[in-house]
Amino acid sequence: MKSLSQKVDKIEESQTIAMTTLAKKLRAEGKNVISLSAGEPDFPTPENIKQAAIKAIQDNFTKYTQNEGIPELREAVAEKFRSDNGIDVKASNILVSNGGKHSLFNALQAILNPGDEVIVPAPYWVSFPEMVKLADGTPVIMKTKEENGFTFDASDVEPLLTPRTKAIIINTPSNPSGAVIGEESLRSVARLAREKDFYIISDEIYEKIIYDGNKHFSIGSIDEVRDRVITSSGVSKAYSMTGWRIGFIAANDEIIKRAAKIQSQMTSNASSISQAAALEALRGPQTDIEKMRAAFEKRRDVMLMKLSQIDGITVKKPGGAFYFFPSVKGLIGRTYNGKSLTGSSDVAHFILSEAQVALVPGGAFGSDENIRLSYAYSEKELTEAADRIAAAVAGLK
Ligand SMILES: Cc1ncc(COP(=O)(O)O)c(C=O)c1O
């Protein structure tokens, strides 16, 4: 038979999904696995949002909608970007898609030509390099330093620029590191983007999950790069709506037109019912967001204390999102059952088999000396997981 798509051979499967599936399988086999691998809030979707969806079904709001999203939702998203993020956009600058992942995919497809380079700061969300490749681009990985809290500024970006540089992907707060890139650093990258002419894709899906009294800053609010920033966000994380699949981008007219054209041939509109729910999320009471954010901050503090007591693991305090990305450099080279741990994948598999805690090897995020664990779980589960990891690690030679 003729060979199948080579494009697919070039991309990796999502390790986050693979680890979550493995944990579910072990649980189904009766193992008492605590999974800290998934990237989703554990809270139910707020009641007012669920009721809006039920009403949409009862009102027969169940047909195709405008490809770009219903006008009321595009307006609500534009209003959100103007008031929360200081980004000067109209409803026509908004494209509503099937989740943040789809939004980013559309954005990359809309701007890249074969061979265009996209700078991806590492550690990165697993999908960024693969999405760039699917859009025929070349990911250029920019390592950031743990001692700098995995942040960066223009001086880190500049040495990687070539005539083929088309864009940089910024993700703040970051999955997997929880790093929050400060306003001054973002301003320096904005100046460089203008000077050297490249686009900025700013993934701000964790914008509402930020700690220590800090306020999220959007690079798209900087006037001099207004036209070259694509801001991507959505309702998945802030409103605990991962299953509803609603994401959105704000960008200039031409980019939105192109991204919408791609969407029109690929999926058409996002679910009508989910759009009604997202409208309620944005326009309804915002009290649940703060409750969830505060709960994440408390869990972060509990888990930070527990993890930092484990010999061989060093951990930075994340400024946002709901992940730790501890270094396990101190465990590499230690042995169990006569086998030496050689990298993050060995460490993750060791922790899964000995502590029955599922987490994701850092190699999947571009850093083989780390592991990623999510703290979007109850304090009870987190404490138990940390205790189990500590006990397993104590058994290493
Ligand atoms: C950094 C980042 N961007 C985008 C997304 C995608 O969000 P969604 O579930 O809305 O597709 C995720 C989800 O894990 C993420 O971590």
Image: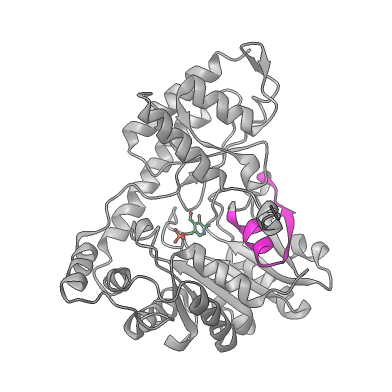
| Front one among 52 and 390 | 52
Give how far across and how far down residue 277 sits, in percent.
28, 69
Q: Relative to 260, does residue 121 appear above or below in the rendering?
A: above
As drawn, is 148 to the left or to the right of 293? right
Q: Is residue 267 visible?
A: yes
Instruction: Inspect this view and state whether residue 223 appears.
Output: no
| Residue 72 belongs to magenta span | no
| Picture layout, residue 70 above or below residue 32 | below
Q: Which image quadrant for residue 377?
A: top left
Q: Give the image quarter of residue 301.
A: top left
- Residue lying furthest front in this view? 1
Q: Which corner quadrant holds the C terminus?
A: top right
Q: State whether residue 116 is above or below residue 72.
A: above
Q: Does the segment drawn in magenta span residue 129? A: yes
The residue drawn where x is 54% and y is 15% is 394
Asked if residue 263 lies left or right of residue 229, the reply is: left
Q: Residue 194: where, in percent of width, then height?
A: 72, 80
Say which residue appears at 32% left-offset and 32% top-offset.
380
208 or 94, nearer to the observer: 94
Extent of the magenta region: 127-146
Residue beneath the point at 81% across and 72% down: 164
